[in-house]
Amino acid sequence: MSGIHYRESVSTDIPAMAEIRAAEWGTIEYWMTRITGYINCELHPQQALMQRVMYVALENDAVIGFIAGHLTRRYECDGELEWINVMPEFRGNGVASELLQMLARWFVQQNATRICVDVDPDNPTARKFYRRHGAEDLNKHWLVWNDIKLVSRMNE
C-alpha cells in the first residue's frame, strides 16, 4: 500500500502503540507500562527469552500498526508473536501481513522456526488471519507455525 512504510520501533513510538492497544482493551497508561516493560526486557511473558523486537507501520510519521515478538521456550516453540495491532481504518490493506512478514524474517535471522501465538478462541478474525498465513491449531488458545520461514518468503 503506497504511503505506508515500516521500521523497527523506537521509544517515541510507545505512546502511539499504547493508544492503538487501548482502543481495543485497557487504558493507555496500562499499555504504556506493558509495552515499555516488554521492550526494555523488564516484563517477561512466560518462558520468554531476552531477545525481542517490535516493528511499526507508519503513514507519513504516524504509527498505524505494530507487531512485537520474542524468543521463547513456551510450548516447545522457538519464538512467540506477542502483539499485532493495526488501526481499524488500515485493516484489509496488507499492513498486518507486512508486519507479520517482517517479524517472520526476524525470527529466521534468530534461527527460530517454530513460532506460536496466543489467540482468543472467540476472535475468528484473528484466527482466520493467522491460518491464512500458515498457522495451525496448537490447542484451544494457541496457534503455531511449524516453519515461519514460509511466512518470511510469502512475497518473494
Image: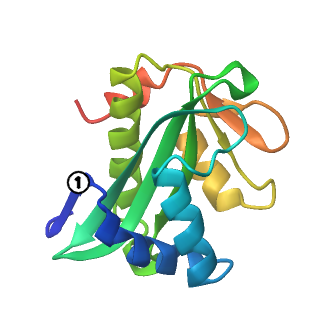
Question: Where residue 1 sits: x, y (%)?
Answer: 21, 63
User: Relative to 13, is 38 above or below?
Assistant: above
Q: Is residue 130 left or right of residue 151?
A: right
User: Label 1 sits on what residue type?
Assistant: Arg
Q: In this view, does 92 lie to the left or right of 132?
A: left
Which residue appears at 33% of the width and 64% of the height?
A: 11
Q: Which residue corresponds to mark 1?
A: 7
Q: Is residue 81 left or right of residue 62?
A: right
Which residue appears at 49% of the width and 81% of the height?
A: 19
Asked whether 129 or 10 is in front, the reply is 10
Question: Where residue 20 sits: x, y (%)?
Answer: 49, 76
Query: Which residue is at the far front?
Result: 42
User: Relative to 40, is 151 above or below?
Assistant: above
Which residue appears at 42% of the width and 65% of the height?
A: 92
How many numbered marks, from 0 up? 1
> In which quadrant will I find the C terminus?
top left
Q: Is residue 87 left or right of residue 3?
A: right
Toward which corner of the image does residue 101 lie, by quadrant?
top left
Toward which corner of the image does residue 91 lie, by quadrant?
bottom left
- How packed mark 1 is, by other alpha carbons closer than 10 Å (few <14, some 14-19, many 20 or more), is few
Asked whether 76 or 97 is in front, the reply is 76
Asked whether 72 or 100 is in front, the reply is 72
Question: Where residue 12 sits: x, y (%)?
Answer: 30, 71
Question: Where residue 26 sits: x, y (%)?
Answer: 68, 79
Which residue appears at 39% of the width and 22% of the height?
A: 110
Asked whether 97 or 142 is in front, the reply is 142
User: Relative to 139, is 39 above or below?
Assistant: below
